[in-house]
């Protein structure tokens, strides 16, 4: 999983970028890659190895109302934190595109939460206490961003620490809501706030 994703970022991602910033084709290609590399292996692993119903095991069936409420609450807190840190949101109209809305804002949460909080964190929790499991998952989550950050020359320690903190908070949402929907909603909201409302600040 890690090797395939890193190879994609280092060898293929530039070609996907060349499809055009903000184009629907770029978004569709990103969706396809994430479905194949991130989501499908998790479903196959749960079905073929663990022999469980994937949707239920991932936390997408039970307690969904609690998850939605938790997601909305954390999203509100993230928006308030952005407002306190950067002031009122900027004019977002120039940053609205297929890429900014469907890419990081309304799909990344689904694609990333399934393998990380839905699968990896829950698997770790069967082998260790929640707190180290959540910490380890957060480190792995941040590590998966590293190849992209380095390739695009975006790495900074504040960014890495922010990703760690958000990841840890999403783990808490899963623990207390017992639903992955809270993580998905919060993750998408965080990306929308960062990439659209505050233009990546």
Image: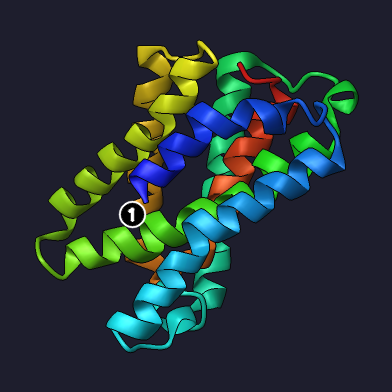
The picture quadrant where one finds residue 194 is: top right
> Compared with residue 32, is residue 126 higher up or lower down, i.e. above or below?
below
Q: In this orientation, does residue 127 appear? A: yes
Residue 120 % position (x, y): 30, 59
Residue 154 % position (x, y): 50, 14
The single residue placed furthest to the front in the displayed view is 11
> Compared with residue 158, is residue 140 higher up or lower down, i.e. above or below?
below
Instruction: Give the structural element (helix, strand or loop) at label 1.
Output: helix
Q: Residue at x 45, y 36 (%)?
A: 7
What residue is disc 1 on? 172
The single residue placed furthest to the left in the displayed view is 128
Left or right: residue 82 versus residue 45 is right
Q: Residue at x 76, y 34 (%)?
A: 100
Who is closer to the viewer here, 179 or 80? Answer: 179
Q: In this orientation, does residue 71 appear? A: no
> Compared with residue 58, is residue 194 higher up or lower down, i.e. above or below?
above
Residue 195 % position (x, y): 67, 28
């Amino acid at each position: 999983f890690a090797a395939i994703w890193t190879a994609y970022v280092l060898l293929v991602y530039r070609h996907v970028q060349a499809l055009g910033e903000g184009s629907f084709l770029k978004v569709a290609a990103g969706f396809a890659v994430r479905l194949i590399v991130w989501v499908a292996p998790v479903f196959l692993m749960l079905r073929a190895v663990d022999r469980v119903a994937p949707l239920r095991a991932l936390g997408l069936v039970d307690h969904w109302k609690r998850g939605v409420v938790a997601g909305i609450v954390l999203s509100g807190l993230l928006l308030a934190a952005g407002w306190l840190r950067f002031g009122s949101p900027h004019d977002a109209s120039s940053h609205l595109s297929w890429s900014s809305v469907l890419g990081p804002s309304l799909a990344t949460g689904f694609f990333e939460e399934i393998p990380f909080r839905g699968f990896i964190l829950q698997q770790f929790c069967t082998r260790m206490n929640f707190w180290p499991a959540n910490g380890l998952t957060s480190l792995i989550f941040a590590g998966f961003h590293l190849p992209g950050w380095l390739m695009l020359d975006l790495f900074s320690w504040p960014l890495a620490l922010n990703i760690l903190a958000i990841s840890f908070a999403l783990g808490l949402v899963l623990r207390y809501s017992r639903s992955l929907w809270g993580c998905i909603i919060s993750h998408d909201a965080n990306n929308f706030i960062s990439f659209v409302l505050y233009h990546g600040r």
